[in-house]
Image (tube, coloured by chain):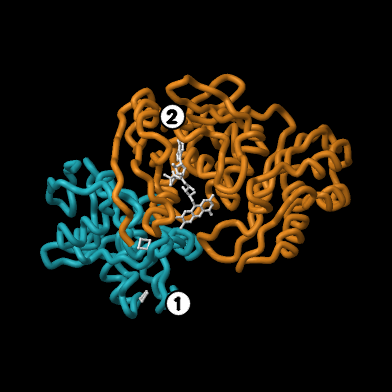
Amino acid sequence: MPRIRVEVDGATYEDDVEPRLLLVHYLRERLGKVGTPVGCDTSNCGACTVLMDGMSVKSCSVLAVQADGSDVTTVEGLGIDGTTHPMQRAFHEEHALQCGYCTPGMIMASLDLLRENADPSETEVREGLEGNLCRCTGYQNIVKAVRRAAKEMREPAGQEVTP
Amino acid sequence: MIPAAFDYARPASVDDAVRVLADAGEDAKVLAGGQSLMPLLRLRLAIPDALVDVGRIGALREIRDDGDALVIGAMATHHQVIRDPLVREHAPLIAAAAETVADPAVRHRGTFGGSLAHADPAGDLPAVALALDAVFLVRSVRGEREIPATEFFVDWMTSAMEPDELLVGVRVPKPGPGWGVHYEKFHRTAQAWAIVGVACAVRRNGGAIEEARVALTNMGPAPVRADGVENAVRGRPVSEDSFRSAAEHATEGTEPPGDLHGSPEYRSHLATVLTSRALAAAAV
Ligand SMILES: Cc1cc2nc3c(=O)[nH]c(=O)nc-3n(C[C@H](O)[C@H](O)[C@H](O)COP(=O)(O)OP(=O)(O)OC[C@H]3O[C@@H](n4cnc5c(N)ncnc54)[C@H](O)[C@@H]3O)c2cc1C
Ligand code: FES
Ligand code: FES
């Protein structure tokens, strides 16, 4: 069995894995990171989105062996130590979730979008999240939340310029 | 679902990869970005004995200038191709079509070579490769061979490559002066495959079309060149009328599929309308 070494949410893990083990199952079943759900068998829904070396990937479409040597961030890697990430706060404040199943993937895909575009328009948010399906919200509040978080991340509160 | 068990190899070089493929036999598969293969494994529509992961062979990701052509490494991701300055300058049709593929997460992992080797008739890049007269560079333990785009796509999900061959790159000729290009894709929802797509490259000389290459996505078991359109538009003036009448030939020799996205008749109608639009946009 191949042995892999990955960094997940700031901690390093070394494990023997079967080649067929999907990254999402490794995260959920071996590391207990159940914050990342599985929503489909076809790579369509995006619920399982995580960042791998800083870029969004659908963790159901990557083998754990392919992640060997990578740095993975799941939704559980945000808001550690009792703090909340501005993106998590914005989803809460804008009511950008109902059942919450799509939310971890939406949040990780949104962070990926802001990496390349710190101030996305409504259309750019919709295009950036085209790989993430939500069956509840109708997307309106998700778009609002992402733009709100983007604003907050550009101009962090409490950083007013001192006169 | 969980894929069936398979052996896994991660060769470090192209030489190693083709040796592993030769030893592994018919039921081994190359693993590129995995964005088409992984769903097939999960649904157990594919049950290979072994996967040969070429994801760590850095040389396969290179995009280089080769004089009168670009050579795009098979493992260049869609994400990389869209942003590559050489591709944007010399093969903007590839960047434009790759932008319409799937969604950002899939484009981060899915590769240019994988979308061609997969030979999915609904894939966007095969028709683009046809319209650009690209040449496929293929390696095996027997050596390297070149396959012109017109001979690469054989049938539904079937390319002219042997099971032990690895696509290493694609040579795309740089267009000379006067060429314009366009990819016209019709789909109904975000992140969706083309119901029909038209890739088009035309060379203008003043007010006339001197040469055109037109290829169709999802109008048969394999992407096809629309020879009838190409012949009909050659020598005609650049005008709405020329494009519309040439586009009437778009369905010649096609076998459009019928599925829940559209009937063969609907696809034929789309092919005609989209071809006319693509010619007009490419000829601007
Ligand atoms: C949700 C979703 C939406 C999508 N939408 C689109 C779309 O709109 N348009 C579109 O064109 N595509 C779409 N795709 C497919 C995407 O473009 C894939 O990236 C592509 O089809 C396969 O590339 P890959 O690198 O992931 O190949 P893989 O999945 O790794 O491989 C695919 C096949 O090609 C073979 N192969 C791959 N590379 C080589 C090589 N170098 N040599 C020999 N054989 C090789 C493999 O053995 C396998 O059989 C979509 C995919 C998903 C998941
Ligand atoms: S679970 Fe649906 S894309 Fe991964
Ligand atoms: S909140 Fe239920 S799927 Fe998005």
Q: CA distance from mark 2 to mark 1?
A: 41 Å
Residue at the spot x=68%, y=48% of the render? B216
User: Which quadrant of the rendered structure holds the N terminus of chain A?
Assistant: top left
Of tags 2 and 1, which is closer to the observer? 2
Q: Position of residue B183 (x, y in %)?
A: 65, 48
Position of residue B103 measured from the top left corner of the image (x, y, whole percent) = 46, 55
Which labelled disc corresponds to residue B62? Answer: 2
Residue at image location 23% in from the left, 54% down from the top:
A73
| Few, some or many residues within 10 Å of mark 2 (<14, 14–19, 20+) | some
Q: Which mark is residue A67?
A: none
Element assignment for label 1: loop
Proximity of marks 2 and 1: CB atoms separated by less than 8 Å? no
- Residue at figure coordinates x 61%, y 61% from the top left: B187
Amino acid type of the residue tagged 2 in the rendering: Glu
Looking at the picture, tell me which residue is in the foreground, B51 or A12.
B51
Question: Does label 1 point to a residue whose CB lies under 8 Å from ligand 3?
Answer: no
Give the quarter of the figure containing the C terminus of chain A.
Answer: bottom left
Circle 2 sits in a helix, a strand or a loop, which is it? Answer: loop
Q: Chain of mark 2?
A: B
In the image, what residue type sits under mark 1?
A: Gly
Tell me which chain appears cyan: A
Left or right placement of residue B135 versus residue A98 in this view: right
Q: Quadrant of residue B21?
A: top left
| Image colour assigned to chain B | orange
Discs 2 and 1 carry the same chain letter: no
Q: Residues within 10 Å of mark 1 (few under 14, many from 20)?
A: few
Report the disc number at residue A138: 1
Q: How many marks?
A: 2
